[in-house]
């Protein structure tokens, strides 16, 4: 198969993922009990009028068909509560989510890769301690770590406890998201560099008198990069689409916060829009992972 | 070592950057009192979906809070006393029959864009309020006996309001109607686009109001910045132009816990929905004792938690064969006796609540009738009432059965992840010891409202919010035709004699001019309610309000917005 064919297949799979996730989210939100118009204290005539205004009195299949037709032109409908186009609302928040995810990814990469190289290429008490720390980060869910850091931030006053503002507001959510990923990268990198150092090439280089440091940082590291790149895309996708819990805990105004609000008010088109953005991030990440994997291992692209 | 130094420098830089976002102090007052200038930061748990209080999507506390900061009404109900007081209208007179109110508008008042305010703006606002194309959520609350008020403007400073029938609260009705600028919104009303006007993306420069602040900047998901209205019309006793503050920054902070953390960290000064969860009160008191915060306790909330049964005709028909007791007053009385409210207060609210037995709590001092029936915890009396209905433990398993041997069982719907849900769980446990099985169903609000709307429930444990002290302003709850008459809403004719009696008493009460007579009639309503118990009231929290030490001039009250109702008199210390 050609590279173009490989890419086309992956792009189609990504689009299918976005479509299925979005349609699923919309239909589930519509089928859930209650709707945007229902409230205590609202008389039945008011509720009926509001349902009619919003098109909620139509059968679910008809609502879905109308939404589907509009979505072909990238019109994802209008949010009931904000009275604004869903695409505009989602775009504003997606940027915030992307900022948080990109920062977290950079921190995780800059921390996790060197950390893994060190723990994979050396021995000793300090290295065992570093591995222990890595396991600790790996086992603490971001939700718990963000809550802990928020409590510390509130008690010490060192950092803003929530919200979005200057660079300082990024610290708590970024660390909450980045530390477990850094730990994953450390584990993978340590394993991979250990394997690379055990190859005949590395052993013969050592026998020729090349320093261990040079072998690790110039040769073995490059060789060990393949497995990391192969899953990097998946990590990117997961990070961009999976930061919702941390966003909610830290009041970061991203897609997670918007999705929660949309779900709580049965703002169905907004639910679908948020799901579309999350799925698009995930699909893009998986696509990137596939491409990177194909780059480091041409057998994948040609499979 | 150098690396550690760099790390500490980084931390200091971050802390300094963080400090830059905190509120600014006002200029020092020479007399030590309030000074103009500075800003305060308030939190809001959800974003206002619109800046238009008349919009169909405006039935939310955030829209009301922002409207009270940016708009003004002819008359304001003083949240402390419950009495209407002159606001945009400097005075008013009431005709002998109580149906005609003549308002004289203040002279020299202008909107924030400098355009003078006249009676034409009042006429326009009421036209928009009642216009069917707007579909305002406020309209039904500004009617008397389901009919709109008639508004006339004989001259630029006079407005005549004619009520369809005598209505004792009179001018207080107008506390809910912000006056919008005709010169900016007339075109939208004529084009039937008023409902969508002044959304959150509307450029601030194209909006204007008569409130103390104007919208300066809106950052989606983050904050709303309100700046001083340069044309605001109020002055303090010393003649200083209000508001004192240059700015109020409203940060959108989702959730009470996040709000508490930010208050503790000093990044917000006050909470718009200002109540504090019981579990946070002790830590806040410690912070107050250390001088980090100030706490106010204005009294017992007027929004109690209640349990009501589905008393609709459809539910009665459905339960007629298997569970007829669910419609019986004696069953509800037995449930009320079986509930240990003191245990709920002490366990769940850690003492920060009081037991209540009816919709009017001791926090509503003018209207609370202590003589209304009470149901203190009395398991023996509960058992006797249940036995009277034929519900006894027939097989010795500790649970009650009816004459056919079916277990006594019903479900309670409640709001999950909320103190209402935890209260319902305690009720479930207490009723289990009384031999009654309760299935607790925790739902999110839309699901709960959906089940309520379709009548698909046995009982609901929830809290109904009161927007006013005066019961005549809550007729939607008391009258059998009301949509908030939750146990059996929107009845064509009263389903029971006691509901008919309450309807008559409330109509008389709403029309009676003398307060003492109104109080007497309403005490009778509370007695009837307590005897027939359509809703089993459980507890009402003691309201605790926490603010930073920087907040000056606050007069915390029980009704929302508990601090910002007096926003023009707040100042930054």
Image (tube, coloured by chain):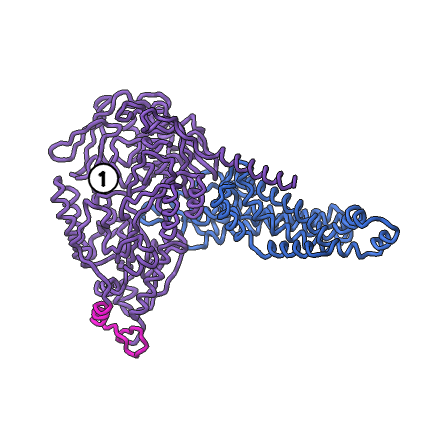
Chain colours: A blue, B purple
Q: Quadrant of the N terminus of chain B?
A: top right
> What residue is shown at x 36% (from left), y 49% (from top)?
B281
Q: Position of residue B491 (x, y in %)?
A: 24, 52
Q: Position of residue B432 (x, y in %)?
A: 32, 68
Q: Quadrant of residue B236?
A: top left
Residue extending farthest to the front is B1
A136 sits to left or right of B305: right
Indicate whether B237 appears above or below B498: above
Q: Position of residue A278 (x, y in %)?
A: 56, 47
> What residue is shown at x 50% (from left), y 47% (from top)?
A152
B534 sits to left or right of B48: left
Q: Position of residue B485 (x, y in %)?
A: 26, 51
The residue indicated by pointer 1 is B82
Indicate whether B386 appears above or below A150: below
Query: Does the image show residue B80?
Result: yes
Magenta segment, which residues?
Answer: B379-404
Q: Please tell me which residue lies in front, B371 or B524.
A: B371
> What residue is shown at x 37% (from left), y 58% (from top)?
B422
Residue extending farthest to the bottom is B395
Secondary structure that dominates the magenta span: loop
Callout 1 crowding tier (Cα within 10 Å): few <14, some 14–19, many ≥20: some
């Amino acid at each position: 198969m050609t590279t173009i064919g490989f890419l086309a297949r992956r792009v189609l799979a990504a689009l299918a993922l976005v479509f299925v996730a979005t349609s699923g989210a919309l239909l589930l939100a519509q089928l859930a009990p209650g709707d945007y118009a229902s409230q205590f204290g609202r008389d039945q005539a008011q509720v009926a009028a509001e349902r009619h205004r919003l098109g909620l009195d139509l059968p679910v299949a008809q609502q879905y068909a109308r939404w589907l037709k509009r979505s072909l032109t990238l019109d994802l409908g209008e949010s009931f509560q904000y009275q604004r186009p869903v695409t505009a609302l989602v775009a504003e928040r997606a940027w915030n989510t992307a900022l948080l995810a990109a920062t977290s990814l950079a921190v995780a990469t800059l921390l996790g890769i060197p950390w893994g190289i060190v723990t994979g290429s050396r021995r000793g008490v300090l290295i065992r301690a570093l591995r222990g720390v890595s396991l600790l980060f790996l086992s603490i869910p971001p939700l718990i770590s963000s809550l802990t850091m928020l409590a510390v931030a509130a008690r010490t006053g060192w950092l803003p406890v929530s919200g979005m503002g200057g660079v300082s507001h990024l610290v708590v959510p970024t660390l909450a998201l980045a530390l477990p990923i850094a730990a994953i990268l450390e584990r993978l990198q340590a394993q991979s560099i250990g394997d690379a150092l055990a190859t005949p090439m590395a052993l013969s280089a050592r026998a020729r008198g090349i320093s261990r440091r040079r072998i690790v940082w110039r040769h073995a590291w490059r060789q060990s990069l393949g497995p990391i790149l192969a899953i990097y895309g998946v990590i990117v996708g997961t990070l961009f689409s999976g930061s919702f819990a941390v966003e909610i805990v830290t009041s970061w105004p991203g897609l997670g916060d918007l999705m929660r609000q949309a779900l709580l008010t049965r703002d169905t088109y907004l639910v679908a829009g948020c799901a579309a953005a999350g799925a698009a991030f995930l699909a893009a990440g998986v696509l990137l992972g596939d491409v990177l994997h194909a780059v480091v291992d041409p057998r994948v692209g040609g499979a | 070592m150098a690396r550690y130094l760099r790390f500490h420098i980084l931390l200091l830089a971050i802390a300094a950057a963080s400090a830059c976002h905190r509120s600014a102090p006002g200029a020092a007052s020479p007399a030590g009192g309030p000074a103009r200038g500075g800003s305060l930061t308030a939190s809001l748990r959800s974003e206002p979906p619109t800046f238009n209080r008349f919009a169909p999507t405006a039935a939310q506390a955030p829209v009301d809070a922002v409207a009270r900061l940016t708009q003004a009404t002819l008359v304001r109900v003083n949240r402390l006393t419950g009495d209407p007081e002159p606001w945009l209208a400097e005075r008013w007179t009431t005709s002998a029959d109580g149906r005609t109110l003549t308002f004289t508008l203040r002279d020299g008042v202008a909107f924030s864009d400098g355009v003078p305010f006249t009676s034409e703006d009042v006429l326009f606002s009421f036209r928009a309020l009642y216009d069917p194309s707007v579909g305002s959520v406020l309209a039904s609350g500004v009617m008397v006996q389901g009919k709109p008020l008639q508004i006339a403007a004989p001259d630029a400073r006079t407005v005549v309001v004619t009520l369809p029938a005598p209505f004792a609260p009179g001018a207080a009705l107008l506390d809910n109607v912000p006056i919008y600028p005709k010169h900016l919104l007339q075109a939208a009303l004529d084009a039937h686009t008023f409902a969508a006007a002044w959304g959150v993306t509307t450029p601030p420069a194209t909006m204007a109001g008569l409130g103390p602040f104007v919208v300066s900047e809106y950052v989606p998901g983050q904050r709303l910045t309100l700046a001083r209205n340069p044309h605001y019309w109020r002055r303090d006793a010393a003649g200083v132009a209000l508001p004192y503050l240059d700015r109020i920054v409203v940060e959108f902070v989702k959730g009470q816990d996040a709000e508490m953390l930010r208050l503790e960290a000093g990044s917000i000064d006050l909470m718009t929905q200002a109540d504090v969860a019981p579990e946070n009160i002790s830590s806040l008191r410690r912070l107050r004792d250390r001088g980090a915060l100030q706490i106010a306790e204005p009294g017992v909330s007027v929004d109690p938690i209640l349990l009501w049964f589905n008393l609709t005709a459809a539910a009665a028909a459905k339960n007629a064969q298997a569970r007829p007791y669910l419609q019986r007053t004696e069953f509800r009385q037995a449930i009320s006796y079986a509930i240990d409210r003191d245990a709920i207060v002490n366990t769940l609210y850690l003492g920060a609540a009081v037991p209540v037995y009816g919709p009017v709590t001791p926090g509503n001092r003018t209207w609370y009738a202590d003589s209304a029936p009470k149901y203190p915890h009395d398991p023996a009396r509960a058992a006797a009432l249940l036995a009277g209905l034929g519900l006894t433990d027939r097989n010795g398993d500790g649970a009650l059965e009816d004459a056919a041997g079916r277990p006594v069982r019903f479900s309670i719907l409640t709001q999950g992840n909320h103190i209402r849900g935890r209260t319902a769980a305690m009720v479930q446990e207490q009723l289990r010891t009384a031999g009654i099985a309760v299935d607790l169903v925790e739902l999110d609000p839309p699901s709960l409202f959906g089940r309520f709307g379709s009548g698909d429930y046995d009982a609901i444990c929830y809290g109904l919010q009161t927007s006013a002290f005066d019961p005549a302003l809550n007729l939607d709850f008391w009258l059998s035709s009301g949509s908030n008459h939750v146990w059996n809403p929107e009845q064509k004719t009263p389903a029971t004699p006691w509901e008919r009696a309450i309807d008559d008493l409330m109509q008389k009460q709403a029309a009676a001019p003398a307060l003492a007579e109104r109080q007497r009639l309403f005490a009778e309503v509370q007695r009837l309610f307590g005897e027939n118990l359509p809703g089993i009231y459980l507890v009402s929290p003691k309201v605790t309000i926490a603010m930073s030490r920087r907040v000056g001039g606050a007069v915390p009250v029980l009704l929302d917005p508990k601090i910002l109702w007096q926003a023009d008199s707040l100042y930054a210390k």
